[in-house]
Image: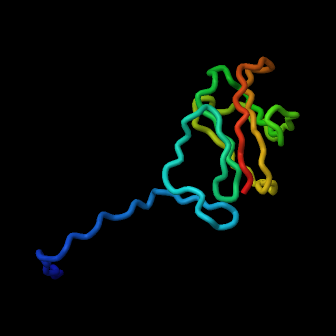
Amino acid sequence: VSRRAVNKNAAPLPPPQSQSVPTYYSPNGQVSYTGDITPTGSFWVRHINSYIEVGWQNLPAATNAVEVYRSVNQNGPWTLLMQQNNPDAVGPAYIRLIDLTISESYYYQLTAFDDTALLATYGPEHLESL
């Protein structure tokens, strides 16, 4: 095994680019976001590539079910979009939905339940169309 000679006068190489920095695209192929997308609120809705991501964290500890609703109006009427039993209340947890309506704007709302008792309501969160 031979060693290559090192040119001590050569300019230093730039630092390697991180392979863990994600890039997110809108359905039309445009970059919508690059970098860490760690959520900060208890409930969020956003476009991730061609999906709609619905997520939550730091819900009441007794939460054993969540329901997500959406509406074209901020004050409803609301249509049930999804239900999740035994969710990770601490999170962050999320579900990515394939949705053919990403070209339309909606408001989203999350409700947290303990059996049949309503513990908390989050939102509405507005998600612009793409």
Residue extending farthest to the left is 8
Residue at image coords 83%, 42%: 72
Decide which of 113, 77 is in the foreground and name it.
Answer: 77
Q: Quadrant of residue 95?
A: top right
Decide which of 5, 121 is in the foreground and name it.
Answer: 121
Residue extending farthest to the top is 117
Give the image location of residue 102, x and y in percent.
76, 54
Decide which of 125, 84 is in the foreground and name it.
Answer: 125
84 with respect to 34 (left or right): right
| Quadrant showing the N terminus | bottom left
Q: Quadrant of residue 112?
A: top right
Give the image location of residue 75, x and y in percent.
82, 31
Compared to residue 60, the image places residue 127 above or below, namely below
Q: Quadrant of residue 30?
A: bottom right
Question: How many numbered tags mark residues here?
Answer: 0
Compared to residue 3, the image places residue 43 above or below, namely above
Compared to residue 59, the image places residue 71 above or below, namely below
Give the image location of residue 65, x and y in percent.
74, 28
Decide which of 55, 62 is in the foreground and name it.
Answer: 55
Give the image location of residue 39, x and y in percent.
56, 40
Residue at image coords 66%, 60%: 26
Compared to residue 24, the image places residue 81 above or below, namely above
